[in-house]
Amino acid sequence: MFSNEITCIFKVLEKQIVYSGDCDSDNGCVFFSLASLEKFHLHTNDWVNLKLVDNVVHLATVVSVENDLDDDCAYISPILYFNLIGRDKHVDSVSMSASTQLTIFPVADIEVANEINLSLVTSPDYPHLSDLFHLYENLVHDYFSKQRILKQNDILAISSLDNPDFYRLYDDPVSIHWPVIYFSVQKIDGTAKHCVKTRPQKTQIYIFGIVHSPIPYAANLYFSDKPNLPIPERYCDKLTKLVHPYLYQLKRRIGAILVSGPTGCGKLLTTRKVASRLNLNLFVLECYDLLADTSVATAKAFETQLSKIKSYAPCIVFLRSIDLLCLDKEDVRVEDVMKNFLVSCQRDRPNGEHGIILIASTSKPVNDTLNKFGFLFTVNNHLSIETLKETERRDIIQIFLKDNDRLDDVTRREIIDTMAAQTNGFLYGDLMTVCIKLNNLDEVKMKEICPAVIKEHSRKYARSLGAPTIPNVSWSDIGGLEEAKKEVIDCIQRPTDYPQLQQRGLRRCGFLLYGPPGTGKTLLAKAVASQFSYNFLSVKGPELISAYVGQSEENIRNIFQRAIKARPSIVFFDELDSLAPKRGKFGDSGGVMDRIVSQLACEMDIIANYPNIFVFGATNRPDLLDSGLLRPGRFERWVYVGPPCSLEERISVLSALTHRFNLADGLELTTIEERLPQYLTGADFYSICSSAMMTALQRVVKEIENGEKDERTAQIDINQDDFDTALKYFTPSVKKEELENYQAIRARMERD
C-alpha cells in the first residue's frame, strides 16, 4: 500500500467500463492502466481518497483494466467527477480537466452506513409524480443490492436500461434512450458527512420528497449503449462561453441564446454536449408541437409548456425551430407570453440560483427571429453553426461505417478518407444515410459503389437542403478557350500550390468573364469548379432584385453567407450588368440599384479574407458595370471569352460537342468545319450539332417506319447531309460588326 500523496492528470470517461469486479464503478472507482499502477505503486482493490478541489474528498477503489487507457492518467466516471468538484457544479468539465490534477492519498478508515436518506432530483427526462415513487424505490433497492460508495450531498445517477418497469412506463422513444434517474443523498446515519460505503441487507435506504439540483448530465451518454457522435469542440466552446455567465449572480437576468444553422448541422447535439459539460438539465421544447389553428391557442400552448420549466431548474430550455413562432409577424401574443415568463423567472430567482437558459434554434435566416424576439436575443448572443470540416466528417464516418470482417483496416481507412474528401457540405444525417447504404457490402463493392452513392445522395438532397454542389463538367466538355482556361487556372492553382503567396496577400478572388453571348462563360466557370472540387453557386443577376426595401441587399448577403459555409466554393454571377450597373445612372427615388452595388462591393471585400472562395462574374456589356467593382481586390482579373477563331479551336469545339455522336464512316471534323461560316460562338456550334442530330434521328425513324431498318438494331449515324440540312436553317447569333464592337471593348478594357 502506498503511503504518500499522488498527483496525476485525470480524464472523465465517456462510456462505462465493463469489468468483472464488484466495486461501485459509477461513484466509487478510479481506473488505471497496468503501467500506471506500477508507476504509482498502487494495487487493484486498494482503497484511496480522491480530491480535485479543496475540502472535497471522495472514497474510491483502485481498479486496473486492460482497455486502451493512457499511462500516467487516472480515469473516473462523470458521476464521480460531479461529486468531486465541490459547490460550483457548473464549472466547465473540459477546462477543469485541462487545468486541475487529481490528488490521491491513503484512507485511514472506512465506515459502513446504517441508514441513508435519498430524494428524487427533478428532471425533464422522467416524471416525478408521487404515485410513481414505488418504481423509483424498486430501482434504488436494486442499485444498492451491491456495495456502493457515497457521501452526503452526492448525486447518484442510476441507469434503468435493464428495468422493464421503465420501458412500460415511457411511450416516448427518446425517454427510453436516456433512462437515467437522479437521486440526491440528503442524510447519512443522521450526522455522518464524510464518505461511507454501504453493505447489502444491512444499510437501510429511504426515499422522500423531490429536490432541485444540478445533475451529471454526461451520465446519459455514459450509460447509453449508443456510440457518442463527435461534436465539433469549436462550437461547444463558443456555446459554453455564452451560457456559463448566466449561471451565476454575475448576470441576474435569464440567459437567451440563438443558435442558427442548416437543418441537421447538430444544433441539438451541441446543446446536449454543453449541458453535459455544465451539469445542467436539458428540456427540449418542439415549437412545431405548439402550433395551433389560432394564434391564441398557440400562445396558450406555449404558456403551458413554459410553466413546467421552473420545476427543472437549473436547466437549459432548447426551443427547437423558433422561426415557426415568427410566422405571424403582426400578432404579439407569443411575445407577451415570453415576456411574462422572463419576468416570472426573474422574480423567483433573486439571488441568481436555479438558473434557466433559453437556447433557441433556427434553420432560417435569423433576421425574422431577431425582429420578433429582439427583446430576448441579441447579436452578441448568437451562435452560427456551419458545415462540418473534413476531419470532423472523417470522425463521424468512422463511427457510422460498420466494421466489416471482410474489410481490412487499410482499405477501410482509405474508404473513410475518400468519403470525407468527397462529402463537402454533408451534415450528420447525410453522412449517416450514405454509411447505411454502404454497410454490409464487401470490400470490392464498397470501394466501387462509394463515389456513386455520394453523388446520388448529393443530387437528391442538395437542392432541398439549400446546399451548393460540385458541377459535373470536365475540360473535355469545353472546346477552345485555351487562353481563358490558362489564365483562370493559373490564378486559382498557383496560390493552392504555393500557400505562402496567400500569407502575403498575393491572391485574386474576383474574375470578370466578358464577351459575346453564347461563348461559354458559364461553362468555363463550372469546369473550374469541377476541376478543383469547389462547390458552385450560380446566381442570375435579376433573380436577386426584389421590390421590397432592403430585401435585395439581404439576398446578396445570404448568397455570400452560403458561399462561406460551403467553402471551398465559387460564386458565379450571370448577367452581372443587370445587377451592378454604374451608380448614379438610375433615377429611382430609393436608390435601390446603388445600394445593391454597394452591398455587393462590401461582400466581396469580406470574402477576400477567405483563401478558398472565388467570385466569377459574367457579362456581355462590361462597359456598363460600376467602376468600383472593377478595381483591384474585387473583379480585378478581366478574362475575355470570345468565339473560336483558329482552325484548331473550331475543331476542338466540334470534337467536344460530337464526341458522343456516331459519325458516318469517312466523315471528318475538318470536312464539317470547312462548310461552317466564320465567327461562330460556342452556342452556334451547339445549335448546328443538335440540329444535325435531330435530322439524323428523323431520318432513322422514317426508315424504321418504312421497314428498312429494325428498331432493335437501328443506329443513328450522322453524315454530311445532316450537317448541310442543319446549316440551311441556321443564322449566326452574333454578327461580324458586333464582334468588332466586342474587340473594341476588349482593347479599351485592357488599355484601362
Image (spheres, rainbow, N blue to C red):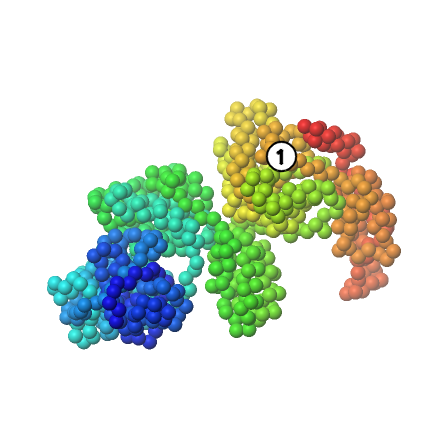
- Circle 1 residue: 636
The picture quadrant where one finds residue 738 is top right
- Identify residue type, mark 1: Glu
Q: Nearer the viewer, residue 712 or 344?
A: 344
Where residue 751 sits: x, y (%)? 70, 28
Q: How many marks?
A: 1
Q: Residue furthest left?
A: 190
Q: Left or right of 37: which side holds 638?
A: right
Q: Quadrant of the N terminus?
A: bottom left
Q: Left or right of 694: which side holds 67?
A: left
Where residue 301 sits: x, y (%)? 32, 49
Q: Quadrant of the C terminus?
A: top right
Q: Residue at x 83, y 59 (%)?
A: 703
Q: Nearer the viewer, residue 322 or 233?
A: 233
The picture quadrant where one finds residue 228 is bottom left
Residue 251 visible in the current orientation: yes
Where residue 158 sits: x, y (%)? 28, 66
Height in image: 215 above or below 523? below
Where residue 438 sits: x, y (%)? 55, 65
Q: Residue at x 26, y 69 (%)?
A: 2
* Numbered disc 1: secondary structure: loop
Height in image: 650 above or below 461? above
Residue 83 visible in the current orientation: no
Q: Residue at x 47, y 63 (%)?
A: 399
Height in image: 407 above or below 56? below
Dot 1, crowdedness within 10 Å: few (<14), some or many (≥20)?
some
Q: Left or right of 569: which side holds 69?
A: left
Q: Residue at x 43, y 39 (%)?
A: 367
